[in-house]
Image: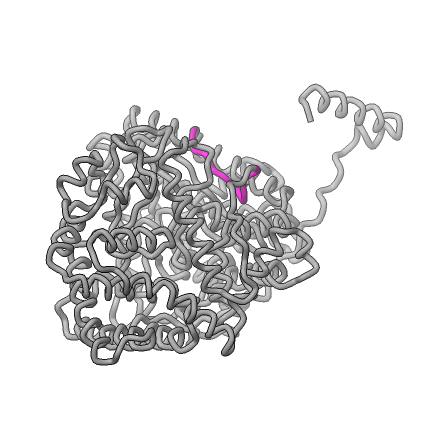
Amino acid sequence: MSRNLQVVVAAGLATSLLILGGSQAMGKPPAEPPLSPLDTSTFDRGADPCTDFYQYVCGGWMAKTGEPTDRNYVALAEEAAGARNRAAMTALLTDRSLAKDPEVDRLQVFYASCMAGGDQADRLAEASLRGWLGRIDGVETRADFATVLQSLHARGVRAFFRYSGEPDPADKSRFRGEIHQGAFGLPRGTYRDDGAEAAAVIASYRDHVAAMLASSGVERGEANRQAERIVAMEGTLARVSLSFAERFDPSISNNPIDPAALARDYPNFAWADYLKAVGQPAGRPMNVTSPKYLKAVNDGLAQWSMRDLKAYLRWRLLDTVTPALPGAMREEQARFAAAYLDTPRASRADECEVETIKGMGVELSRQYSTRFIGVQARGGAKTIVQQVRGQIADSVDGMTWLSPSAREATRKKIDALSIKVGFPDEWPATGADPMSATNFFDNVMATRGFQEKRAWARVNEPRTRESWEIMVYPDVAPGLAVARLTIPNGYPDVFTNSIILTAAGLTPPRYDADASPELRMGGYGALVGHEVTHVLENHDYDADGEGHDIWTAADVSAHDQRAQCLIKQAGEVELGGGARLNGERTFSENVADLGGVNFAYDALVRALGPRMAQRDKAGFSRAQRFFIAYAQSRCTVQREAYARLDNHAPASFRVNGPLANMPAFAKAFACRKGSAMVRPAERRCVVW
């Protein structure tokens, strides 16, 4: 609606009220509508909110739920939202009444081919697998090897290295080709660990590789020999590979190189033919994320026999497409993952859903977003985002511990920050390969092939700040953000100064379009504040995504002094068995929690003003309901061992820690000075 039309409508409404009754128009404003219901079933009424607010809000639910035995943790909000999302996904993937839409039909055919089991499905998978293994077995020359390797890369089999189009830090308008390290069957850290436990895992992995090779048709003795060589080759590469964090550290991973220089510096591979096949523009600079790693590959290609290289290609194919393999090989992979990688066995339905995300994520995200989320929910969430982001931007001016130049650059960065909510209005192109109703292996190779070639083609496409196609790395399925919107998450992109908040985060209780503002702000608003606090913390990139520090050394020092307060508070948390929480390791998430809930609360006060005092039927004020909603968004039970490894603090600290630092919380619940949830001023942590 245009502004002029809004004025006309408003004037007409006022005239109508005067005609209907001047006393109503000129008298007291109408009473506030009743507040939406508050879920108090999670409460422990025997707990004191001023002593342990987390126990007060979540204690009842925790007692009923108990510590999980089959997974690392159970989270209330995740379970509730997950149930809704699972119902939506089940409908999309199985409800034939929706299949009138050709895109839904294609999704359902793919999913059904994954779910199909039995002898026929195994025979089809075996036949398709034999075709690919035959191509590998037919390799005789180095030129043959390069050709088959490129064909495997084109289906997402990341043997030795991989190529993709990634943002070019030197030119914001385009992507550049990059050579990354390949995939491994074990965590890189296992190969870098000289301890007995790591050695035992590697030995078990070697047996597992041999078993998989034997199942694929390799004679058992030869399978044992090949497994020995494969593990040795993989160990050589893993020990010089980059960590996940190092891969995204420009000081380490930004190593531009001309294609001609690539061929010169790493001469043991047919780079010219490979780069032509993947579409790398001739003469345009590309990037090698780890020259040390690529040198190890280059040296290995000169040393490893053709027999060893073919065995390695066979193994990487089997390890990559495991969900599409015949049942016996899937069972062996699941056994090893459960026994040595601490990966619980997923149901076949969950496994097939993940494979659908990997292969047809854009189609799945589009159908899920438009059918089960919708523009109305997205619009309400955008309002919350604008309120929280506006509050944060205006708060920067008062952060006098930062220098004037740092405040100016930080304010500019938040003002320019693009927060993309839910799903895009324009979607990228999708594949058109026909889907087999019975051969899941062929479907996987076709859909992964489309995704991989899309990543290659980006090198020749313009890059815009509005794009939803950044690469993201959720545990379940790394890939394009726009193809991962069914996973509740927030995806930041420092190169474009943007954040994507996925559609799956817009389901109750994370976001409830029908809930009162304070409940939405306590849940979703605090999440938005959390993500934007991460942006505040990252001062290595400016408002345009250019990589340089926008703070001075004095600013960094001032921040670190404030951070010590929160690090110390976290370090006081006991984890059991005499262990304490690592305040340094968890600081990034703890400071985002602290900033997120503070900013969201301030945004709510700004929006509601005196309406904050309104109470619901149970007597809870809007302020109290905000804090209750925040706590309920964190209610979690987790295994003790997991708490020692997680980069997030235990849920009790994620609630009590920040709230005990907030005078607004103490005021809302009338907590007396000296209460556990009221930190004295000299011990109160304020970073942002």
Q: Residue at x 57, y 38 (%)?
A: 425
Q: Is residue 464 left or right of residue 82?
A: left
Question: Does 279 appear above or below 187?
Answer: above
Residue 82 visible somewhere in the drawing: no
Residue 563, picture quadrant: top left
* Residue 314 spot, x, y in % from top left: 29, 65
The residue at the far bottom in this view is 220
The residue at the far right in this view is 20
Q: Quadrant of the C terminus?
A: top left
The stretch drawn in magenta includes residue 98 = no
Q: Is residue 194 left or right of residue 558?
A: left
* Residue 261 spot, x, y in % from top left: 16, 36
The stretch drawn in magenta includes residue 423 = yes
Residue 575, picture quadrant: bottom left
Instruction: Give the residues in magenta.
Output: 416-425
Q: Is residue 13 left or right of residue 642?
A: right
Q: Nearer the viewer, residue 60 or 265?
A: 265
Q: Residue at x 51, y 41 (%)?
A: 428
* Residue 100 spot, x, y in % from top left: 69, 54
Q: Nearer the viewer, residue 42 or 376?
A: 376
Q: Quadrant of the N terminus?
A: top right
* Residue 15 spot, x, y in % from top left: 83, 23
Residue 472 visible somewhere in the drawing: yes
